[in-house]
Image (tube, grey):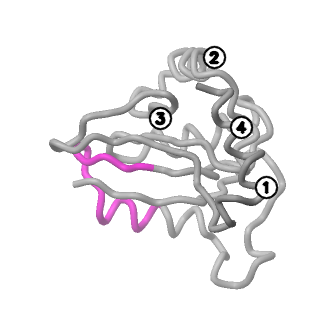
Amino acid sequence: MIYIIGDLHLSFSVDKPMNIFGNNWENHSEKIKENWLNKVNNDDTVILPGDFSWGIDLEEAKSDFKFLNELPGKKILLKGNHDYWWTTVSNMNKFLKENNFENICFLYNNSYLVENKIIVGTRGWTTISPNSEENYKILKREVRKT
């Protein structure tokens, strides 16, 4: 099976409690773990399309990576707008290897074949007018990245 879950906003090493957004966020990491263990098997793949940790750098996010690594399934992470820990792919892969986080990988300028499906990522686009100046700036910036 392929599962997708985003915006975990884990914060095991930083003081960023999610319950400030309401009581339904109380103990949210325990709820994530419980539901994950009830659904995901080691042969499954879980795609996390961003914002999995509040850590500012890889060291701050390490406990969140550890939590994720201990859950079943292969995890494919994409960069979210709050993933400040995200650096270069080579640096992040080195971090994974040094910490024995063996079931986590990154989707960035690459793809994965999972269950006869190709997993790719792209930047989220807005619904602004294609002829607007804002759209032109975004497009120009994205073209420079290729």
Q: Residue furthest front?
A: 131
Residue highlighted by disc 3 = 107
Amino acid type indicated by mark 1: Glu
The answer to whether residue 34 is left or right of residue 67 is: left
Sequence-first disc among 2 and 1 = 2
| Secondary element at image label 2 | helix
* Quadrant hosting residue 74: top left
Residue highlighted by disc 4 = 140
Residue highlighted by disc 1 = 134
* Whether residue 46 is situated above or below residue 32 in the rendered picture: above
- Quick one: 5 or 127, which is closer to the camera? 127
Which residue is painted at 31% across and 65% down in the image?
38
Residue highlighted by disc 2 = 91
- Quick one: 88 or 21, which is closer to the camera? 88
Which x, y percent locates residue 111? 37, 32
| Secondary element at image label 1 | helix
Circle 1 Cα neighbour tier, 10 Å, few/some/many (<14 / 14–19 / ≥20):
few
Which of the two discs, 2 and 3, sits closer to the camera?
A: 3
How far apart are the two marked residues, 2 and 1, measured between alpha carbons? Answer: 32 Å
* Whether residue 90 is situated above or below residue 81 in the rendered picture: above
Q: Residue furthest right?
A: 15
Q: Residue furthest bottom?
A: 23
Circle 4 Cα neighbour tier, 10 Å, few/some/many (<14 / 14–19 / ≥20):
few
How far apart are the two marked residues, 2 and 4, measured between alpha carbons? Answer: 27 Å
Amino acid type indicated by mark 3: Leu
Circle 3 Cα neighbour tier, 10 Å, few/some/many (<14 / 14–19 / ≥20):
many
| Secondary element at image label 4 | helix
The stretch of residues the image draws in magenta is: 33-47
Amino acid type indicated by mark 2: Asn
* Whether residue 7 is situated above or below residue 137 in the rendered picture: below
Which x, y percent locates residue 72? 34, 46
